[in-house]
Amino acid sequence: MRIAFISDIHGNATALDAVLGEINQRNVEKVFVLGDLCFRGPEPHRSLELVKSLNAEVIKGNADEWIVRGIKEGEVPDSALEMMSKERDWALSQLDEGNVEYLKNLPTELKLEYGKVKIHAYHATPHSLFEVVTPYESDQLIAEKMMGSEADIYIYAHIHKPYIRYINGKCIINIGSVGLPFDGLAKSSYALLEIQEESFQTSIVRVAYDVNKVIKQFTESDYPNSEQMKKILSNSGI
């Protein structure tokens, strides 16, 4: 069984097109989407429609929750709250009521089993859409925060920095970001798993896409924070 996990599209439909094309070339049998579909990109509506067309299992991310109910104080730095709220309002204006209802009703975790391999997938942690667990945390902290359920592989998104680690005989994977990588590489990221009964192989796949096209989309739009977003895309990091 060959399955793919994608996430953190952030309204970058151009990047999503490239990732889905690459996934198709690999004859992936099932795609799972771990949230953050629309917010902070130039094409929120097309990104969401592409995700919905996949017939994939999709869960909610923090940015999806923000679209539904807005950004609360304490969820982002105080200095960023006003601008990010304007960005959220812009993204919301590109969506219809059915889109928002879709995001509202998304579940927050996936528990999967292929052969004898169990997978637990979530956006940030099993109990939060917002908590940040970096690649550099101690084994003990990652085990405590991320590995509460019984699984062989734990998969999450949110931090936009992909990695694979093995802790206490378990595998932990961050799948990175399709639309806004934060690790200095201007290529989309997703996780590919190949599972055969009790055996599995994990990998992070990086996919090139037309970054300049997306920068041009921001330039030609009335997006409220376009200069900052173009800088993030150009630098592939924060």
Image (cartoon, rainbow, N blue to C red):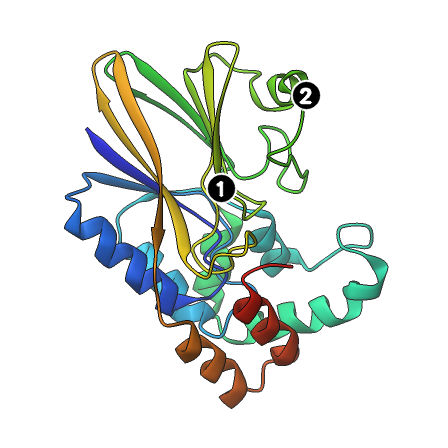
- Please state which of residues 203 and 102 is positioned toward the viewer in this rendering: 203
Q: Earlier in the sequence, mark 2 or mark 1?
A: 2
The quarter of the rendered structure image containing the C terminus is bottom right
Q: Which mark is residue 204?
A: none
The disc labelled 1 sits on which kind of residue? Pro
Say whether residue 50 is left or right of residue 170: left
- Neighbor class of circle 2 (other Cα within 10 Å; few <14, some 14-19, many 20+) is few
The residue sitting at 47% across, 12% down in the picture is 150
Residue 85: x %, y % from top left: 71, 68
Q: Is residue 110 above or below residue 223?
A: above
- Please state which of residues 39 and 228 is positioned toward the viewer in this rendering: 228
The residue at which mark 1 appears reads as 162
The residue at which mark 2 appears reads as 141
Asked if labels 1 and 2 touch by Cβ distance under 8 angstroms, the answer is no
Residue 133: x %, y % from top left: 65, 34
The residue sitting at 21% across, 14% down in the picture is 197
- Neighbor class of circle 1 (other Cα within 10 Å; few <14, some 14-19, many 20+) is many
Q: Quadrant of residue 27?
A: top left
Residue 55: x %, y % from top left: 26, 48
Say whether residue 189 is left or right of residue 82: left
